[in-house]
Amino acid sequence: MKVLIGLLLAYAGMVALCLAMNRHYRQVFGDFPGSRLQLGLRAAGTLVLLQSLAVSISQWGWTIGPTACFGLLTVAALLLVFLLPYVPRFVLLSGSAGLVAGLIGTVLLFTV
Amino acid sequence: MKNTFSQSMAWLHTWGGLLFGWMLFSIFLTGALSVFDREISYWMQPENGNSGASMAEAVNHAGDYLQATAPDSPGWLIVPPNDRNPGMTVYWQEGPESRHKALDPATGEEVPRRTDGGHFFVHYHFELNSGVIGRWIVGAVAMMMLVGLLTGIVIHKRIFKDFFTFRPQSGGQRSWLDAHNALGVLTLPFLLVITFSGLAIFAFMYIPSPVKLLYGGDSEAFFDEAIPHVHRQPTGEVSELLPLGGFAQRADSAFGNNPVWYLSVENPGDRNAVVIAGALNKDQLTLSSQQILFDGVTGKVLQKGIPLKPAAQIQRVLTGLHFAQFGGYAVHWLYFLSGLIGALMIASGLVLFIVKRRRQYVAENDVSAGFLHLAGRMNVAAVAGPVLGSLAFLWSNRLIPIAWSDRAGWEISAFFAVWLMSLVHAMLRPQLRAWIEQIAAAGGLCLLLPLLNLLTTDQHLLRTLPAGDWRLAGVDLTVLFMGGIFIYLALRLAARQPVPVKAIHADGPWEFADR
């Protein structure tokens, strides 16, 4: 379960970092992001990726966790790269859904 | 053409990548399959699933078998059943050769369906199944992979700008370059680690001079210092070995959550016999740092754990990162996927070589039309060939009669024979047709394999799925999934109209402008 949450967060974080770039923001929304939005997306993406790392560490510990986290980031980013040109709107949708599910999952993990 | 630094890097990347890529694809493919070597071994000897023997019983049977078969051998090794493969394998030294047999854990008799199982993929990926020479070749190829990665980083230049970029609508060279870059950049941590650690495992073989210089070539003295452990010489005095199952049990309870990986015996039958039990570490990167050494005759513990020095510890961690025995199935799947993605990155590079040059005027090309023709065909054989060969290996396991004496050898022959057929086919057919036909053939072999399994064994999907044996079902389901992808690919390629050569030339040279 933690693995899935880690993957969802990795994906959501990558989507945010991707949308922070002019070229890809335009692919999804048709125009360019404002500089404040861009900064926000970048910060959010970084934070969510760090959260994914934290989930990996809680699953596997300090040595295996970061190693496995690289694997999750790779799979998430490749999924994104090969979905983006074909279904740009779906990337936005799945990224948001992944973020919500990942956040709820993390909260449940550390409270229940 | 090689005036600047990045131009020479590009030249090295292009030519090293092409010539060594033909071999690298098969190494990455079989390396990825090696992640699941135990499950594949189980799938190739499904009869082992019914045994249900305890580990101590199984190890006792193994000890009896070795005592009867190789009493004078200087060393035995037993890999008992574990939660990933209920089968058992014994190895022993016979002169300069290492021999092995798969034993039924319940009876200790040889398993009739003789096969190398998933081990074949492991052996192919680090020594091309051909011993020391193969190991040297793989070392050279891996070195070139490292060079390819580093030169790739140098010539890419836009790693972060193009981090998420893939433009399939651009078509041709642009799309292939995007795909090659994305596959390479996003798996870069894995690719660097797996290539470097692969080389580090055999560092003492590839770079022997330090040991020669500092230890006068006495590699045993070096290893004794690097991995300090009790070492006993045989006395020549005959003494009976205690039952090995007892050692396995004691080690198992000492290792806690980590299962016993292997049990090895030095000087069996001698008064100085040593039994070594190693754990399979699931909770740390280091490969097997937990070891217990017993006196084989008295049962006394001689040594517990190995006090590794920092350098040896680092080498062990690198080895562990390569073997990927930690972290359970989630990590195994990540390694498997990353390995396949690495293979795809290599394949896309090979295709890119052709796509880039096919669209240029012949006179502007750095290669002759004849070489381009040959390279295109080599690509088909280098990519589709090992895929077809691996499938043939699995097919032959079910098709070769169990009674055949050298059936394990025939399975391996099937792998290489089908690969050779792929090469011949690629040479004879037009290039696009060769791709379509071989990918379709791989798709057919994939989709029909579970059916063949159903017809020839009783451990097929209709049984393994309800029973929840995911180790066996996983092999069938993965192959089915791959088959779906291959058929989709073949249909996509077949739907594409091959552009007549003349029309391409009328278009003029391919423009490099970045859109």
Image (cartoon, rainbow, N blue to C red):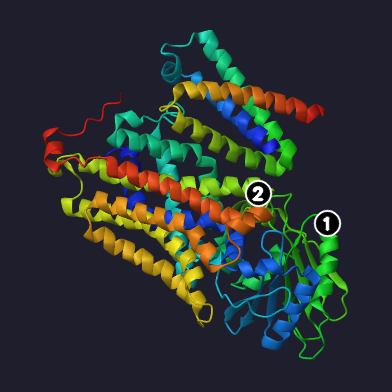
In front of the other: B407 or B151: B407
Q: Quadrant of the N terminus of chain B?
A: top left
Q: Could you tell whether B325 is left or right of B260 in the image? A: left
Q: Secondary structure at mark 1?
A: loop
Q: Position of residue B230 (x, y in %)?
A: 78, 72
Q: Position of residue B185 (x, y in %)?
A: 47, 37
- Closer to the camera, B465 or B331? B465
In the image, what residue occupies the spot 21% across and 33% down?
Answer: B510
Residue located beneath label 2 in the image: B329
Q: Are marks 1 and 2 on the same chain?
A: yes
Judge whether A34 appears above or below A8 on screen.
above
Q: Choose the circle earlier in sequence order: 1 or 2.
A: 1
Q: Which image quadrant is residue B390 in?
A: bottom left
- B390 or B149: which is nearer to us? B390
Callouts 1 and 2 close, C-beta under 8 Å: no
Give me the C-alpha separation between circle 1 and circle 2: 19 Å
Q: Can see residue B36?
A: yes
What residue does disc 1 label? B256
Disc 2 residue type? Tyr
Mark 2: which secondary structure?
Answer: helix
Q: Quadrant of the image for the C terminus of chain B?
A: top left
Picture coordinates of residue B335, whole percent (x, y): 57, 48
Numbered disc 1: what chain? B
Give the crowd class for mark 1: few <14, some 14-19, many >=20 residues within 10 Å: few
- The local crowd at label 2, few if under 14, some if 14 to 19, many if 20 or more residues have their Cα within 10 Å, is few
Q: Say whether residue B148 is visible.
A: no
Q: Measuring 48% from the left and 76% from the top, which residue is drawn there?
A: B409
